[in-house]
Image (cartoon, rainbow, N blue to C red):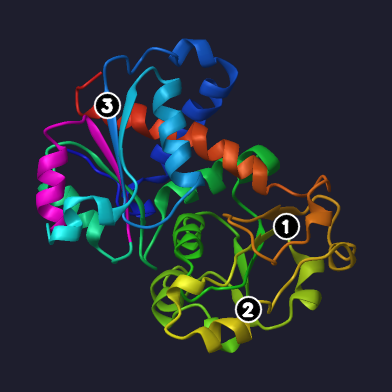
Amino acid sequence: MRSIIDIVDFSTQELEDLINLANDIIENPQKYAHVCDGKKLATLFFEPSTRTRMSFEAAMYELGGHVISMTDAMSSSAAKGESVADTAKTVSCYADIIAMRHPKEGAALVAANNATIPVINAGDGGHCHPTQTLADLLTIYREKGHFDNLTIGLCGDLKFGRTVHSLINALSRYENIKFVLISPEELKLPSYVKKDLLRANKIPYTQTTDLDKSIPSLDILYMTRVQRERFFNEEDYLRLKDSYILTPDKLAKAKKDLSVMHPLPRVNEISVAIDDDSRACYFKQVLNGKYMRMALILELLREAGTI
């Protein structure tokens, strides 16, 4: 039974196939409107979520399926001490596929190892967020038409940002990619990511604290928020939360075809004055996330022989 825990669970060919499937869903929605009739998705969210949970639910509904949800850990048996393994075994009795978000790294893998249905990691702590990366990849492909020969700026919380870690993992497999890592010293990309992904794949990268000087060279600027929930004390969060704010003045220095991305939610990192700029792609990402999750649900259920 195949589950998706990390973006590296996909080959580059499988990523291309999912993107092609998502594009076909966009072009021919009625073709897919009933392919999951009678099937159920269980959404198990032990952390708050708006976009990810709702996009999974919208994806299943638009495929003709149904959704059963657990959106508050305190209202589930987890509050009584039930293990992730037992939860996965239990939910396998009710649904055909699971999407799970959990604050602990590795929780999705535990669920997948114990479930009898496919499990999709919808974010596990600071580890990774593969379906956000699928949304990111579809957005990049639809904006740029390719993944090669791109200079990508990653800005903000690169230490705890699971979306950043997953995106680096995915793009590291393409040709002539360069990363510009923009963050406060305290939120730099973890050394293991640099060692295992960037250096191991001989991918050029630079580290800087200066967003202004970095913008002119970028093809993609991927902004992230400083995540309050990952900090051990409020003082450090307040000191770092407004480290980078993208404004029209800063964007004036950028390429005309720059793509500004953000996994959302946004706090202060991107001025609302940029929302109407043609280079703003973050709400396109939201929509693309639904289509990629539709493609993923379809593919996993097909592989499981359920549809």
**Which residue does the image show at 27% across and 21% down from the upper left?**
39
Q: Is there CB contact under 8 Å for labels 2 and 3?
A: no
Q: Residue type at mark 3: give it.
A: Lys
In front: label 2 or label 3: 3
In front: label 3 or label 1: 3
| Residue farthest front in this picture | 75
Residue 116 at what x, y percent from top left? Answer: 11, 38
Q: Is residue 124 left or right of residue 154?
A: left
How far apart, in angstroms, are the residues tagged by discs 3 and 1?
40 Å
Q: Quadrant of the C terminus?
A: top left
Residue 146 in the image: above or below residue 299:
below
The secondary element bearing badge 1 is classed as loop
Q: Earlier in the sequence, mark 2 or mark 3?
A: 3
Q: Residue type at mark 2: give it.
A: Thr
How far apart, in angstroms, are the residues tagged by discs 1 and 2?
15 Å
Q: Residue type at mark 1: give it.
A: Asp
Q: Earlier in the sequence, mark 3 or mark 1?
A: 3
Label at residue 219:
1
Q: Residue 246's quadrant in the figure?
A: bottom right
Q: Disc 3 marks which residue?
A: 40
